[in-house]
Amino acid sequence: MTTIRVTQTYTMVLRSVANVSSAAFANLGYETAGSSAGLAASWEYQTLAAAEQFAGFDTVSEAVEDFEEDWSSNQSFLFALAGVAAASFDAASGLPPQAFEDFEEGWLTSPFVTTLTGASASFDTGTPQNFEDFEQQWSDNQNYLFALSGTAAASFDTGTPEAFEDFEEQWASNENYLFALSGTSAALFDAGANAFENFEGTWTPMP
């Protein structure tokens, strides 16, 4: 898309004044006519023509790309279906056709029974039960003992047997260690004057 832009401007021409080094403006109000119609004295009229090219999209130029035409002739494609019939399911099964697939008929499932009738659950062959208690016929776990019988209570420590382990004897002879002090006397400080150390008395200089 190509357009032509015309620019019109008026440019002031500086007129020299005799015996004056500087220039002065004249005819600022366009009162004095120029040499040709539409011109003003002391002014120059300039016309500038420039060609500007803008992007044009589609065979019929548009200023924007809407991706609707000239893309592999996609304008010829159909974006809506016409003249078609709705899908129909289960027509071959002898049942009324449905507009949706429920996966209940025609998937080799029709002969199968999904609900049991005239049957009852039975667990354990020895004494049948209507529930599973996981007590029989699980790798013969019914033969295992879940309670101890004919046993004696545990006895700890050979010297004085105890029914519990107190970790006081026969652990690396720790029963020989002293856990209480005996035969001791109270500490005295300051030549026996105090039963506590107040750090006030004489301290023997260290050699």
Image: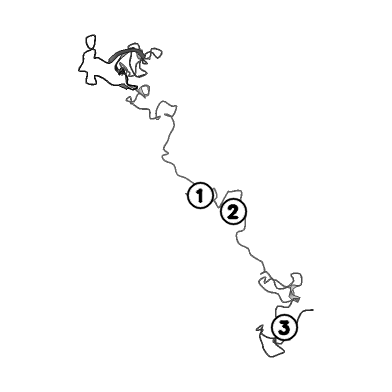
- Is 125 in front, or is 154? 154
Mark 1 lies on a secondary structure that is: loop
Tell which tag, 3 or 1, sits nearer the viewer.
3
Tell me which colouring the rendered structure shows. Answer: one colour
The kind of residue tagged 2 is: Gln
Question: Could you tell me if residue 112 is visible in this image?
Answer: yes
Residue linked to disc 2: 142
- Residue projecting furthest to the left: 31
**Quarter of the picture holding the C terminus:** bottom right
Query: Which quadrant would residue 32 be assigned to in this image?
Result: top left
Q: Is residue 159 left or right of residue 116?
A: right
* Marking on residue 203: 3
Query: Which quadrant would residue 45 be assigned to in this image?
Result: top left
The answer to whether residue 186 is above or below residue 108 is below
- Residue projecting furthest to the front: 19
Assess disc 2: are there few (<14), some (14-19) or many (≥20) residues with their C-alpha within 10 Å of its C-alpha.
Answer: few
Instruction: Please report the residue visible at 26 percent of the width from the left and 19 percent of the height from the top.
Output: 26
Mark 1 and mark 2 in contact (Cβ < 8 Å)? Answer: no
Assess disc 1: are there few (<14), some (14-19) or many (≥20) residues with their C-alpha within 10 Å of its C-alpha.
Answer: few
Q: In the image, residue 30 lies at what x, y percent?
A: 22, 18
- Is 199 in front, or is 20? 20
The kind of residue tagged 3 is: Trp
Q: CA distance from mark 3 to mark 1?
A: 86 Å
Q: In the image, residue 31 lies at what x, y percent?
A: 20, 18
Question: Could you tell me if residue 1 is visible in this image?
Answer: no
Residue linked to disc 1: 132
- Is 2 in front, or is 100? 2
* Marking on residue 34: none
The kind of residue tagged 1 is: Glu
Tell which tag, 2 or 3, sits nearer the viewer.
3
